[in-house]
Image (cartoon, grey):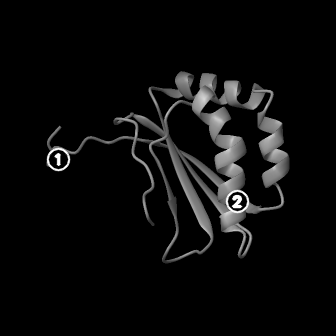
């Protein structure tokens, strides 16, 4: 997977999303996501941890990560995203492009062998 951005410092809780995009539709999806979703997401979720697309393994996948301080922070910002008046426009425009979605909440783990 190739990283596009890395804007946010370490967060203890990460929303890890994988969208599988219809065959040969990745450029269209990325344009719709950038134009319609990103303004809403930046306003409601803040800066992302990054974006990736798959190179090896399952193909046509778009991965994005968003960091949160805790579960309450995740819930508050997710509700703001879902209630944003422009979010349904993105959902409508991208619905035919996304064939599957996986959402995971993952927690950071501190290993003693890795310096802080």
Camera-nearest residue between 55 and 105: 55
Pick whichever of labels 2 and 1 is earlier in the sequence: 2
Callout 2: helix, strand or loop? helix
Identify the residue at image location x=63%, y=71%: 60
Distance, label 2 to label 1, CA atoms, is 37 Å
- Residue 93: percent from left, percent from top: 82, 51
Quadrant placement of the N terminus: bottom left
Identify the residue at image location x=77%, y=26%: 83
Camera-nearest residue between 57 and 53: 53
Asked if 24 appears above or below 37 in the picture, the reply is below
Which image quadrant for residue 80? top right
Identify the residue at image location x=39%, y=34%: 12
Q: Residues within 10 Å of mark 2 (few under 14, many from 20)?
A: many
Callout 1: helix, strand or loop? loop
Q: Residues within 10 Å of mark 1 (few under 14, many from 20)?
A: few
**Residue labelled with disc 1:** 114
- Residue 67: percent from left, percent from top: 46, 36
Tell me the tag on residue 29.
2
Asked if 1 appears above or below 64 in the picture, the reply is below
Identify the residue at image location x=40%, y=40%: 7
Q: Nearer the viewer, mark 2 or mark 1?
A: 2
- Residue 112: percent from left, percent from top: 16, 43
């Amino acid at each position: 997977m190739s990283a596009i951005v890395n804007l946010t410092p370490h967060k203890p809780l990460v929303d890890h999303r994988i969208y599988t995009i219809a065959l040969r539709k990745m450029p269209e999806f990325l344009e719709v996501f950038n134009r319609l979703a990103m303004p809403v997401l930046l306003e409601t979720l803040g800066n992302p941890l990054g974006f990736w697309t798959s190179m090896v393994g399952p193909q046509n996948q778009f991965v994005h990560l968003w960091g949160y301080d805790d579960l309450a922070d995740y819930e508050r910002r997710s509700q703001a995203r879902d209630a944003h008046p422009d979010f349904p426009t993105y959902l409508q425009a991208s619905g035919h492009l996304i064939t599957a979605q996986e959402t995971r909440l993952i927690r950071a783990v501190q290993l003693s062998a890795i310096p802080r």
